[in-house]
Amino acid sequence: MTEEVQNETTAEISLNINDLAFMLKMIDVVTERGGFRGSELVNVGTIRNKLEAFVRANAPKEEAEETTTDGDANAEQSE
């Protein structure tokens, strides 16, 4: 019985490219809000860069283009 519950629980848990892209955006937002200490920034930046490279390499073409142009669109809206 316990094995059945564990199998059902793990079968429901999944990560996809959209989840990873959202995590990337969360890191950017928290950084902009000053949510990390200076001593943490190297580690946060390293993980962020790895995550961004993975998302770009594995995202479908449309999503990859949206990710790269999204930052440009936000900059244009600020001006």
Image (tube, grey):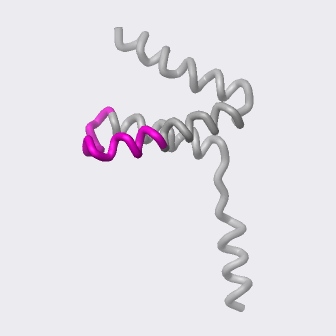
**What span is in magenta?**
32-46
Q: Main secondary structure of the magenta part?
A: helix
Residues 44 and 65: in front is: 44
| x, y percent for residue 24 | 50, 39
The C terminus appears in which quarter of the rendering?
top left
Left or right: 34 in relation to 15:
left
Q: Residue at x 63, y 38 (%)?
A: 54
In the figure, 42 relative to 66: above or below? below
Q: Is residue 79 magenta?
A: no
The N terminus appears in which quarter of the rendering?
bottom right
Left or right: 65 in relation to 25:
right
Q: Residue at x 72, y 86 (%)?
A: 3
Q: Is residue 35 magenta?
A: yes
| x, y percent for residue 61 | 73, 25
In the figure, 13 relative to 31: above or below? below
Q: Residue at x 32, y 46 (%)?
A: 40
